[in-house]
Amino acid sequence: MKIAFELGQNLFADGWTDYELLDSGNGQKLERFGPYLFIRPEPQALWAPQLDEAVWQSASGRFAASDEERGKWELDRNLLETWVLEFDGLKFESMPTPFRHLGFFPEQSPHWRWTETQIKRFIERYKKPPRLLNLFAYSGVASLHAAQAGAEVTHLDASKKAVAQAFRNRELSGLSDAPIRFITDDALRFAEREVRRNRQYDGILLDPPKYGRGPKGEVWQLNENLPELLSCCTRLLSDTPLFIVATIYAIRTSTLAVQSALSDALYHRFGSTVGGMIASGELGIREDRPEGRAIGQALYARWQADFK
């Protein structure tokens, strides 16, 4: 049995009411998060804006980048500190963060809905909830979406602040009794301990940064540590595996590299018996008009197992 591949499967953040890419151009993008407009840097916007300058000037915040990684927000004094958005019945906080995003990543919503489909497929086949591990889980929207669909979720992030926000989002969504285990830990160290404990998961989500630190100062570097983490993830898969989804925001990493790293880890875990499908491509956003331009935001590769 061999893995089949689907290349260039680009996915877009459609189906939102509380998020919209309004316009883009001149290295920037104009987005709506609920009632507020924001301008953020976008090097891929290699064209001119289409909306009037007055629309851009009405934005409540602009992120002024000093370099590729750093910068600061210029915010309207009347802007609320946080506000609540909705998607697929979930409610969660949005706010400007020092990292130029606004508390969640709307381009990842295709993964949330695809995961929901896989969870329901699993429940129908095995008559039990799948156990999911969400690494680098941040503010918890993916975890909440999966729990709402019927999964038991282990939500892990190295940031206490992010996990606290995930708690608040759980309460906002009315999911305080949902089977979600929240953990603050270093993703790689936790995965290694789970392997030693012989813990198993049916599905795994991971959204690793290019660079980061764990709660005890552990250093994460994508190019050095991703193969080791993927190896741990494959060893954590149960006898009824469902999927692995990897999302990468590192610009210098290609889709083919992420796909190859995932398939290599799967072959090392399962050998020639591994099957299923790996789809890979970009997660993107696009302007909501007939001639709207599209902008890639991240790379992804996701493996969907064949049922036994």
Image (cartoon, rainbow, N blue to C red):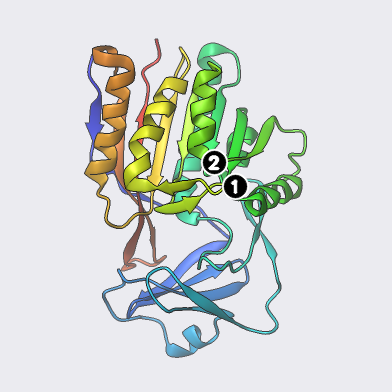
Q: Position of residue 41 (x, y in %)?
A: 41, 74
Residue marked by disc 2: 186
In the drawing, does residue 22 fall left or right of residue 133? left
| Real-space CA distance between mark 1 and mark 2, rounded to the nearest whole angstrom | 6 Å
Look at label 1 and name its amino acid: Pro
Q: Residue furthest front?
A: 217
| Percent of width and height locating residue 71 | 48, 76
Q: Residue at x 39, y 66 (%)?
A: 287
Disc 2 residue type (three-letter): Asp
Q: Which residue is mark 1?
A: 215
Q: Extreme top residue here?
A: 308
**Residue at the (59%, 80%) spot, across then down:** 60
| Residue 136 horizontal/vertical position (percent) | 52, 44
Q: The C terminus is located in which quarter?
A: top left
Whichever of labels 1 and 2 marks the residue nearer the N terminus, that label is: 2
285 relative to 156, above or below? below
Q: Position of residue 156 (x, y in %)?
A: 59, 39
- Residue 70 falls left or right of residue 186: left
